Amino acid sequence: MIKIRYYADDLSEQRHEKIIELLNEIHNRHRIPVEITRVRAWYGPIFAFRGSIEYLSEEDAWKRDFCRNKDLSRNLGEAPSKIFKSRSGNLCIAGTVGVVVDGILQWAAVYDEGLDFLQRVLELGNPKFGVVVGELAESELEKYDWNWRNFAKRMVEKEIDLVMENPEKDWIVEVKQEFYV
């Protein structure tokens, strides 16, 4: 089951309120479950939220959702510690928006990138992870001996990190590590 989680409170009160508003709209329009993990309660109580709210320390949320999460690392293209920790080692997950699949954080973005993601979900609907495109037919696989089958599949099949489909347009996120020359 897919749900969207917000690690509150964002550094900006205006963005914090906008994220909560978008989460409510997403829940109402698409029936996608939404939740808040409150790691920094800077702006007082949250009223009229359509999902669940839990209170955790930033360290506990980090250990549960970000630390040693291979799915998240793969989908982000790098270790979560490079994105969600400062150079001095301080955690920076307050303000993060994430997608949780079957209880495991699969993708996350901070600040305006997270806000943009929520606006896309509101426009397009349900996100899907690990969508395989270009499947190799079984009849084609039979042409190769067992040593070459995996190679042939890797050459034809591609797993897209995140896809949101809509009758009018699709939104695809494919994360790659930086290429250094």
Image (cartoon, grey):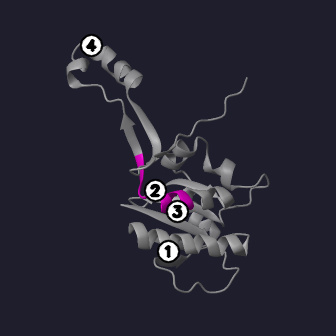
Distance from label 2 to label 1 (Cα)?
A: 15 Å
- Type of amino acid at the residue the image marks with label 2: Leu
In primary-sequence order, the first of circles 2 and 1 is 1
- Type of amino acid at the residue the image marks with label 4: Tyr
**Where is mark 2, residue-wise?**
124
Where is residue 105 shown, x and y percent of the image? Answer: 49, 57
Q: Nearer the viewer, mark 4 or mark 2?
A: 2
Is 158 above or below relative to 11?
A: above
Distance from label 3 to label 4 (Cα)?
A: 43 Å
Local secondary structure at mark 1: helix
Is 71 above or below relative to 34?
A: above
In primary-sequence order, the first of circles 3 and 4 is 3
- Residue positioned most to the right: 88
Residue shown at 42%/69% (left/top)?
Answer: 29
**Where is mark 1, residue-wise?**
24
Give the residues drawn in magenta, as a range: 118-129
**Callout 1: 10 Å neighbours few (<14), some, many (20+)?**
many
